Image: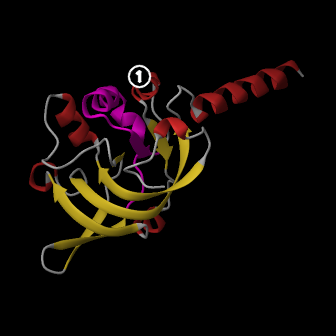
Amino acid sequence: MDIATLDPRALALGQAITLDGLVHTGRDRLHKFLHEGGDLPPGIDLRTSALYHCGPVMVPEGAGGWRMVAGGPTTSSREEPYEAEVIARFGLRLIIGKGGMGPRTLAACREHGCVYLQAVGGAATSIAAAVERVEGVDFLEAFGAAEAMWHLRVRGFPVTVAMDAHGNSLYDRVAAESAARLRALLRA
């Protein structure tokens, strides 16, 4: 699915998709910076791209270029204090990470038409294979390589809709089903 034209409200909870287009990495330092009033670099539009919770392993390649050798998702819950504001302020529509996010982010997804997409943890080299090219990097000097905002052109990036734009969460569903099964086992 083309990231730039994808309609988050049309995606179903649990739906497996592959993404093609522009993905930007963003971890703790970027989220805190944006939350405290910082701005996105010129030309970066989160309404037509995705924000990936990832600290990639990059190696220099050619004349000033870069290549991603590993790019697995990082734990998204660390961004919970910031994500709802990032969604509202920048029109973010697609978040990629692992482990889910909390109620503030889920409410912002419902209000603003954003989805949280689960990438497979432990598949860093497979995910890196979906990166066609590294289009650039911002905040490298300020934040360091793992926390910099890398701009990645991807094709066939596999994800699953884990929090939809209608307020539903696979993580909440699994927790509720697990609690119900536990209660049933305790009654037996």
* Percent x, y of residue 146: 25, 55
Name the outermost residue toward the right.
188
Name the outermost residue toward the front.
5
Residue located at (83% from left, 26% from top):
185
Residue located at (29% from left, 43% from top):
46
Which amino acid, mark 1? Arg
Q: Locate the C terminus and report the quarter of the image it occupies.
A: top right
* Percent x, y of residue 150: 24, 57
Asked if residue 107 lies left or right of residue 25, the reply is right
Which is nearer the eye, 182 or 24? 24
Residue located at (36% from left, 35% from top):
78
What colour scheme was applied to this rendering of the protein? secondary structure
Residue located at (23% from left, 64% from top):
135
182 vs 5: above or below: above
Q: How many marks?
A: 1
45 vs 80: above or below: below
* Percent x, y of residue 56: 32, 59
Which is nearer the eye, 82 or 6? 6
Q: Which residues are magenta?
A: 71-98
Quadrant for residue 23, please give it: bottom left
Q: Is residue 76 magenta?
A: yes
For mark 1, give the secondary structure. Answer: helix
58 vs 183: above or below: below
Task: Quickly name the residue at label 1.
Answer: 104
Label 1 crowding class (10 Å Cα cut-off): few <14, some 14-19, many 20+?
Answer: some
* Percent x, y of residue 121: 50, 54
